Amino acid sequence: MPLDQTYAALSDPSRRAMLQRLAQTPELSVSDLAAPLPIALPTVMKHLDVLSRAGLIQRQKTGRTVMVSLAPHAMDEARAWLERTANFWSERIDRLATIVEEQEKR
């Protein structure tokens, strides 16, 4: 799962809202997932396609009902990237703070 697809999928507020609902309720039908959103069902389906291609959700069809759930470990790569980036900047900020403190002592 390319990291670019994950962040592109997360860039839309409707898609983030869908993922947040799925985090609260592990499995929802497409219609239940779409219900609180101010967008039409065809648009919801397009958003679900983006989330699916990014590997963030799974869909399972049972009869005429399509159930949607979060994909296990979907955010692992994105989380790891954020942690590495946070560590990088934390180290630099700590060094900057040390330099500033040393200069203030002079």
Image: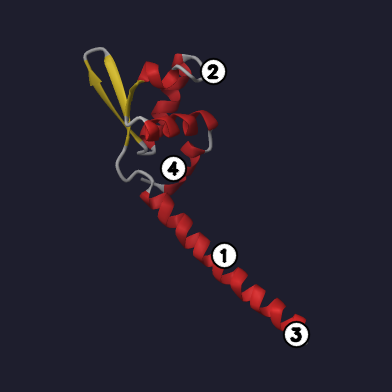
Mark 2 and 1 residues: CB-CB less than 8 Å, in contact? no
Reply above or below: 62 against 100.
above
Q: Relative to residue 49, is residue 97 drawn left or right? A: right
Measured in 3D between alpha carbons, the distance from the residue under mark 2 to the one under mark 1, in whole angstroms, is: 38 Å
Instruction: Give residue 89's mark.
Output: 1
Mark 3 and 1 residues: CB-CB less than 8 Å, in contact? no
Q: Position of residue 8 (x, y in %)?
A: 49, 40
Measured in 3D between alpha carbons, the distance from the residue under mark 4 to the one under mark 3, in whole angstroms, is: 46 Å
Measured in 3D between alpha carbons, the distance from the residue under mark 3 to the one under mark 2, in whole angstroms, is: 57 Å
Instruction: Give residue 6's mark.
Output: 4
Q: Relative to residue 37, is residue 67 drawn left or right? A: left
Residue at 45% in and 16% down: 35
Query: Which of the two marks, 1 or 4, is nearer to us in this view?
Result: 1
> Which residue is more in the foreground, 41 or 36?
36
The amino acid at mark 1 is Trp
Query: Which of the two marks, 3 or 2, is nearer to us in this view?
Result: 3
Measured in 3D between alpha carbons, the distance from the residue under mark 1 to the one under mark 4, in whole angstroms, is: 22 Å
Instruction: Give residue 38's mark.
Output: 2
